[in-house]
Amino acid sequence: MINEVTRILLIVLTVAISLGIGFFLRRLTIRRLSQTFLDAWIVQTIGIIVALPAIALILIFAPVIYTSTFVSLDQIWSGLALRYKSFDLIGLGTSIIISTLILAIAIGIARTIMTLSIRGWGDNRIDINIRTLIGRVCYIIIITFAFFWVLAVWRVELTVPVAFIGTITIACAFAIQEILKNLVAGFYLLMERPFHIGDMITTATYTGRVEDVAIRATKLRLISGEQITIPNALMFGGIVLNDSFYGEKRVILDLVMAQDLFIKGETFSQVKRTIEQVETVMSKPEPLVTLGNYTGSNLTLYVQFWLTSSDVTTISDVMYELRQVLPHADISIHRDAMIV
């Protein structure tokens, strides 16, 4: 009984040592490779591969310790094969391991290439939309190649998956017409580039900054902070105003005040000085204040100034400063861009 307990303790010790060596090698490898350009997925896969030989020692030494005689891996497989004669256990296990490694490495390589294409080519001044498209196409090609490689490992004829994919494609084409429409529109947006990632755009309903142009939808970060996803078919078929196309933007405010508070010349100068004090307002062209119309006992001033496309918060700053010097006036953003 003591001998049996000793063997069990030695097996437990062997398992602990093997796992310790394996995890140490994996951690050391991941720490070194994480400082390179490789994607996290492929780094983790390589770390597992490095740890496998140490963990495999368990299968070699555990039978030796327990039986006190050397038992090779072939003998272990042969013993299992005698029990399951109808299965090629060695071939099955080998195919599973190879298929897993192919898929894991392929995903890691695909993610690495996609990251490099999106970030690495920025120094070459390649458009962000083109880089994103190239990265995603490369990702799909690599995963497709890995998929057919796995089929070759399992000795599946290509006619079977091709016929299957063809049948599924025809069946799904009618069910996913809207999705296909968004996909086609997504490729158009990536190729034609009516706007870029980082641009401020205005659609029929929303105004926000473009955060991502995916194959199916476009993500906008609204001025209020929310993120919204718009299907590419709507972006493709609707009217989109690219506010970032020009380096500067004109803003017109409506300032409504009582006639008895208006002093000709002095009110104009006061409003203009207040706008010029806001640092983010462009000095050229100069701010302009004009008299718009009289309505009853009130009059309306058109306050015009210019700002860069990225400084949209300047509008709020100007309205706040005007409110301080003219507390009884009503201030709003003018909607008619033709007014000068």
Image (cartoon, helix red, strand yellow):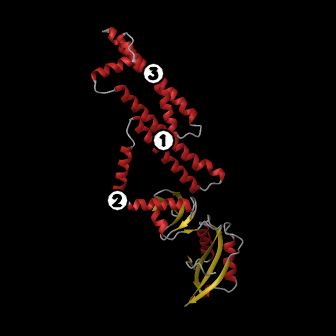
Figure quadrant of residue 296 = bottom right
Q: Which residue sits at x=35%, y=15%?
A: 8
- Quarter placement of the N terminus: top left
Badge 2 vs badge 3, beta-carbon distance below 8 Å: no
Q: Is residue 61 above or below residue 188?
A: above
Q: Mark 1, residues whose alpha carbon is within 10 Å: few (<14), some, or many (≥20)?
A: many
Which comes before the other along the chain, label 2 or label 3? 3
- Under mark 1, the amino acid is Ile
The reply to whether residue 226 is visible in this rendering is no
Please state which of the two labelled residues, at mark 1 or mark 2, is closer to the viewer.
2
Q: Nearer the viewer, residue 296 or 62?
A: 62
Which comes before the other along the chain, label 1 or label 2? 1
Disc number at residue 107? 1
SS of the residue at dot 1? helix
Q: CA distance from mark 1 to mark 2?
A: 29 Å
- Under mark 3, the amino acid is Ser
Q: Is residue 102 above or below residue 299?
A: above
Q: Give how far across and how far down residue 333 sits, in percent.
A: 56, 75
Disc number at residue 305? none
The residue wearing badge 2 is 175
- Under mark 2, the amino acid is Ala
Q: Is residue 328 above or below residue 189?
A: below
Q: CA distance from mark 2 to mark 3?
A: 52 Å
Q: CA distance from mark 1 to mark 3?
A: 28 Å
Q: Give how far across and how far down residue 217 sits, in percent.
A: 46, 59
The residue wearing badge 3 is 18
- Quarter placement of the C terminus: bottom right
Q: Nearer the viewer, residue 195 or 327?
A: 195
